[in-house]
Every structure is written in structure tokens, then in C-alpha cells.
Amino acid sequence: MSKALISSTAGLGTRAKGITLILAQILPVMAIVSLFPAIPKLFAEFGDRPGAGFLIPAIVTIPSLVCAIFAPIAGIISDRFGRRKSFIMGLAVYVLAGIAPLFLDSLEAILASRAILGIAEAFAITISSALIGDYFEDDRHRWTSWVGVATSVAGTALIVTGGVLADVSWRGPFAVYLAALPALFMAILVIDEPRKTPRPEGSAVALLGFPWRAAFVIAPVTLITSVLYYVEPLNIARVLDMRGAGSSTQIGIIQAATSIAYIGGAFLYRRLHELAVGRLLAIAGVFIAIGQVIIGRGVDWQTVAFGATIQQIGGGMIIPVLLAWGQSMLPLEQRGRGMGIWATAFFAGTFVCSPLVSLVTSATGGLLPAMQVMGVITLLFALAAPFIVPAPGRKSTQALKA
């Protein structure tokens, strides 16, 4: 690659940069799903330790919890000290912390490495989200839709890979984190500081502080949407098992088949991205709501799988819609901190969803009626979304950025 070409694209979005950022967006998925098949092996290895019933599942969940806590800090650091250095540092620590359990024998040490992984994940996901907005601006919808496609495909592949490696050893699935090396190498080669749009000297826009009004709209809407989004992924395997779908392998195959619709949802967003965010969330919410109700009312696994397929169409729209919305509402100088707040809201949904579904399950007498109730709640949110999220008119946009 010539120096002239590198100079001409310095600070601007390119295909190589977009691919690198999409690879970084896969990392939170890698942190969770690749270890699902290893949980029985981890219990066999560490099950006799005090508190193993809590500590072993925490190996899977603690990175997301720590990521949710540290994402705003990662965003502030990237805004202050630069995107490139912060991003590369996060990816490097991610690889090292990810493979650390290959060499650790202590359960406590493994948990500590997983917490460090969560901090690195906060840097990777927050800064890659900000950079997509920085580099691609009005074309961001195309790249955020590819995030949805990539995470769906990667999630399916990682579950299978983790299962194969878990058959070798309980340590095996941790080798999956070596797959983050290509993202690290590409980041070193192609990621640079985004080019700022020149502004007139003394411009009032340059004096604006952090857009807290925008953040106070984006964060709660993202949290609510995330909670409703995670209802199906966190519970569909149990419902399929209750409806006689067969072995864990068969259930995994059914889930993989239904996730194809997730890719369709991401591409549907690309076709509809010019609609107002509230309308896009409404469309996605209707798909998710209908799917959840069908899942809850399904009398056999085929019907449940049909409901999951419909839900996945809406699910495939959610991440691209929320990402592009957050990026568009935040100025480049503050986008790192803003996307950190976004990441905290989104990943917090993982933890809020499970106790909420458990509470509804206790109140309704079972998981199946709970799925129907959550479907109705999702539908109500979908109907309200166009009124909750302001339309992209000039006045509302200026107000939110004030």
C-alpha cells in the first residue's frame, strides 16, 4: 500500500477499518458463548471448591458485568487520549487475559483474568462503536447492519468450536481467544485517529459540553430494549427442551437455524434505515413481541422454532438501530464517552433480563406464560417507541445536543 494512499485515507473510513471494527464487535459474543459447552467440564474440575455453584457460572458472566461498569471510563479515556492507542491497548489486553486460563490452575485466578477481560472488552466494544460513527458518519447504517450479521454468524460458529475444544479439555475453549489476534494486528495496521470536520473559529458548537440530554434519552431506551431483546436468547433453549426438541446438540442446531432470520433482520434495517428511530424500534419490537407470544403458546418444538425465527428478525434489527442512533446523536469529540454509556446500558440488559423473567415466571406460574407476558410488554413498548424517541427534526436534534 503506497504512502500516498495511506495519507489520502488517514482519519477516514475504509473497508479495512470497517472490517477491523466489526471483528472487535464480535469480542463480547466470544467472551460468553464460546464457554457455554465448557461449563460441565469446569464443574467437573472445580465443583468441589467452596462456592463453586456461584463462581463457575461467573466465569462466563463476569466479563459482561465488568464491561458494563467500565465502558463509560473507556469512552472518557478514548476521548481524552485518542481512539487508536486506547483501542489497540484494549485488544492486546483482551488477547492476553482471554488465553490466561490456559495456564492458570486456580479458580480465583481464572476469575480475576475474566474480570480483566471485561475491562479490555469495555475498551474494544466502546471504542469500536465510536469509531464506526467517526469514520463512516452518514454511511454508518451499512456497517452497523454488518455488526448484526457478524455477531450472529460468529455466535453460532463459536458455540460449535467451544464444544469441540471442550471435548479436549476444560481449558480448550479458552484457546478461542487467539481468534482475536487478527483484529489486533489489523488495528495496528489500519486504525488511526478519525479526521475531525473543520469548524469556524469561535463556533458555538465547539464550546458545547457533553450532550447529557441525548444520553438521558439513549441510555434508558437502550436498557429497556436490551432487556426485551434478551428474553428469547436467554430462554429459548429451555422452551425447546420443554417441547421435546431432543438433545442439546439438536437444540443447538435448531437455534442455529432460527438465527438465520437474525441476518435477515440486519439487512431489513439496511433497507429501512432512513425511517425515524422510534419507528424502527417499533417494527423490531412487533417482530420480537409476536415471536415471544408464539414461543410461549407453542405446543411443539416446531411451533416454538417458528416463533423464534420471527423473534430473530426483530432481534437482527435491534443492535444496528441502537448503535447507529447513538452514534448519530453524539458529536465526535464526545462520542467515546457517549458510546461507553450506551454499552453500559445495553450490557446491563443481560443482567436485568434474567431476574425480571424469573419474577414474571413466579407471578404467572411458569416460563411459557411468562414468555407470553413479556411478549405483550414488548408490544406495548413497540407501540410507545415512536412517541418516546424524538423524530430527527432539526429542533429536537439541536435540543438533545444542547
Image: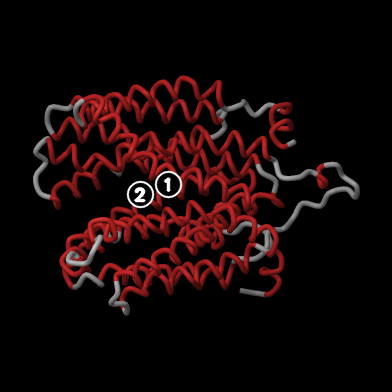
> What is the quadrant of residue 98 in the picture?
bottom left
* Residue occupying the point 33% across, 68% down: 176
Q: Which residue is mark 2?
A: 152
Q: Nearer the viewer, residue 29 or 343?
A: 343
Where does the N terminus fall, quadrant-wise? Answer: bottom right
Q: With respect to residue 267, does 51 lie above or below?
A: below
- Relative horizontal placement of residue 42, taking residue 207 as reference (left or right): left
Instruction: Give the spatial CA distance, label 2 vs label 1.
Output: 6 Å
Q: Nearer the viewer, residue 17 or 234?
A: 234
Residue type beneath disc 1 = Gly
- Relative horizontal placement of residue 387, taking residue 196 as reference (left or right): left
Residue 234 x, y percent position in the rendering: 29, 43
Where does the C terminus fall, quadrant-wise? Answer: top right
Residue 217 x, y percent position in the rendering: 59, 33
Counting the numbered discs, the total is 2
Q: Which residue is mark 1?
A: 148
> What is the quadrant of residue 242 in the picture?
top left
- Relative horizontal placement of residue 97, taking residue 398 as reference (left or right): left
